[in-house]
Image: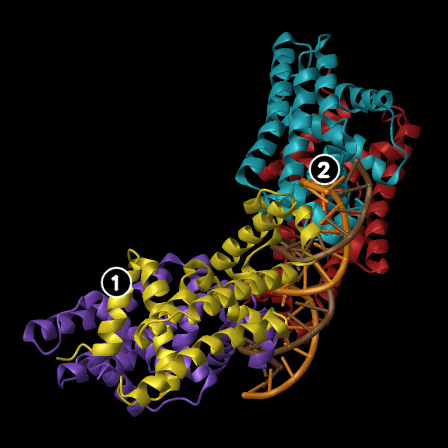
Chain colours: A red, B cyan, C purple, D yellow, E orange, F brown
Amino acid sequence: MDQRRENILDAAKKSFALFGYKGTTVDQIAKIASVGKGTLYLYFETKEDLLNEIVKSLIAEMRKLADASISKGGTIMEKLHSATYSILVYRKEHELLLKLSQEVAQFGTPASQHALREIEEGVIGYIKQHLEIAVANGSIKPCDPEITAFVLVRMYLVLLVDWERKHPPLTNEQISDLIQLYMMDGIAL
Amino acid sequence: MDQRRENILDAAKKSFALFGYKGTTVDQIAKIASVGKGTLYLYFETKEDLLNEIVKSLIAEMRKLADASISKGGTIMEKLHSATYSILVYRKEHELLLKLSQEVAQFGTPASQHALREIEEGVIGYIKQHLEIAVANGSIKPCDPEITAFVLVRMYLVLLVDWERKHPPLTNEQISDLIQLYMMDGIAL
Amino acid sequence: MDQRRENILDAAKKSFALFGYKGTTVDQIAKIASVGKGTLYLYFETKEDLLNEIVKSLIAEMRKLADASISKGGTIMEKLHSATYSILVYRKEHELLLKLSQEVAQFGTPASQHALREIEEGVIGYIKQHLEIAVANGSIKPCDPEITAFVLVRMYLVLLVDWERKHPPLTNEQISDLIQLYMMDGIAL
Amino acid sequence: MDQRRENILDAAKKSFALFGYKGTTVDQIAKIASVGKGTLYLYFETKEDLLNEIVKSLIAEMRKLADASISKGGTIMEKLHSATYSILVYRKEHELLLKLSQEVAQFGTPASQHALREIEEGVIGYIKQHLEIAVANGSIKPCDPEITAFVLVRMYLVLLVDWERKHPPLTNEQISDLIQLYMMDGIAL
DNA sequence: CATGAATGAGTTTTCATTCAT
DNA sequence: GATGAATGAAAACTCATTCAT
């Protein structure tokens, strides 16, 4: 059954997000997924395999999302926003990815690590291109497009993921406005 | 000897930063510190005790730094910069703290967790106060001081810590200029 | 399975009796019980827990035995004999209890220690009562009932347990006769 | 210095008596003896060597004492009493010997074990001889001299050592009287 | 000499993986 | 198939012994 497999993947995601890869025991995952410990090994060779599956699926999901949103039309700013935002919209999962990416450096297959880097660089590269156009256009001030793209992506993450850890989450609209304020217009008068 | 204790603490910091708490074995720490495994237990009761000592010392260091810099004079922007920057200047250590803070939620004593939260809130609170004054002054646009302080601190972290993970580090001057550009003036024309 | 738990308990009893608590390794117990080392921890939290379980079960067994036999009728001497004897009939186990009782003072829970003392005092107290009656009756010579009860119990132990360490064991009948000879009639003409 | 050596031996005796051989750490002994841990190894090769020294000295002491008292004159009962009693007079030490003899079976050198057995058998043998004479004399009832000697020795031990664990110790006179009562005359009227 | 900090072999304990039911 | 009891390799921890001071 494929439902069972999903169950286990979800349980593992949950536990990895909370305790990290090493900090999660197979027993925990099995308990959260409400299956026997042995069942887990019907679907995944090892605990590490499970990790890799999760990373792979997260990456695939986010890539699809990024690809889809990257082609959308609109002004440059709208494009930037939709591209950045869409890839980050899976809040919890991105948080997990962030957490795992550190341990993956230790445990993940080179393939996982490569894919992870690729997708991050893909989004940043896409944004960078549009920033370069905008600078050439004169629609924004001259600035290093690499750094600016990097900071822009992180700002979204900060407002989406970090902020909500200890505060009520912001709506998409609020986030969009804040990015406009902090990155576009500046807070100086 | 106190040098030996420092050795062990440094080795543990290094290993915890690389592999996390659970991912680090006592043997590893001992090997990195070039001491016997038993030696470690002369200075720390348990592996967890070692973790707590590290967290405690990191917190103390950063608090001292923050307190010292917070009183420095200058314009409001300079104050903000010096306060934010100084607390984040211990790049590696902050990175470690960030990493550990997740596992500490699992293992650390409530005291560690409280101190960690307190120091973060202390800096943000200090910045928030100055932002409120600045808004009242009319030196900056009206904006939510809480969110702005939060974003400001995080932007420093992004430029200091995250950026350097895959790029050559930025100088203090560059960081200062970039903050001015992104947060103050905005990239929009 | 409960059989496995018993196996482990028996193995531990055997090893504790031979080498003491500290002198017994968990590996030894596992090997004697013909189970993996990890199996042991499915049934007992720690090695100390295993010790306490053994002490608890020994105490329970002996208490049951003592209670059962204490009510049996007959002459005063028969009563004394059945009470004393029955509690000591579990030779090996009493020997173990004796051995452990010293280490238990170091490691056992206060509950174990209390129970251990209580049961010893219970038997001696019971015998003491009957000795007092016997003295009042004039069925035996005037003597300190406390000391006499104490010596009587020990004599049984000596004949049951100590003797058999280097000699062929005595039958119940022989023991009964010897007690009659040494304690009751005396060897003097 | 030989005083230092005695100090360490005494400390070890004390600790072995309390916690057993395995249960005693070298640190403990050093602390009790108020010397550095290293000092201990100036006088004894290993911890086991220390144990053997103790056993050897205890045996020597007791043998000397036994030999001395065995020749003393008097009635048969007096001879028995003095022989049995003298060997047991070193209460604490005999208790220690008893405790160690179990662990020694595991750890001691064959020489220690042999000596230990020899001395016990020596006393019992001596008493046995005199009992045989007494039976032949008709001064006591016919009885198995082996068992009787064994029981006699043990009864002394019970009154000397066991009793005092939880009661005020008995005087030599009291012990002598009790042996007379229980073993010689019997408590039956 | 006397010491106790340093060590690593040997213990206890944990947990990913297997396999009989 | 699904399970979880059983396992042993690997991790945390202890302590007899050594050796620089």
Q: Position of residue B89 (x, y in %)?
A: 77, 26
- State whether residue A25 appears in this view: yes
**Residue that carries the numbered disc 2 in the rendered image:** B5
Residue under the image location 20 percent in, 81 percent down:
C184
Return the residue found at the far front. D73
Q: Quadrant of residue D34?
A: top right
Label 2, secondary structure: give it. helix
> Of tags 2 and 1, which is closer to the observer?
1
Up/down of D6 relative to A150, above or below: below
For badge 2, the amino acid type reads Arg
In space, the residues marked 2 and 1 are separated at their CA atoms by: 62 Å
Along the line of sight, the residue nearer the viewer: E9 or B140: E9
| Disc 2 chain ID | B
Residue under the image location 28 percent in, 65 percent down:
D175
**Residue that carries the numbered disc 1 in the rendered image:** D174
Which numbered disc covers residue A136?
Answer: none
| Disc 1 chain ID | D
Up/down of D112 relative to A157, above or below: below
- State whether residue C46 appears in this view: no
For badge 1, the amino acid type reads Gln
Q: Position of residue D88 (x, y in %)?
A: 41, 65
Q: Position of residue A25 (x, y in %)?
A: 62, 61
Residue under the image location 83 percent in, 21 percent down:
B189
- Mark 1, Cα crowd under 10 Å, few <14 / some 14-19 / many 20+, is few
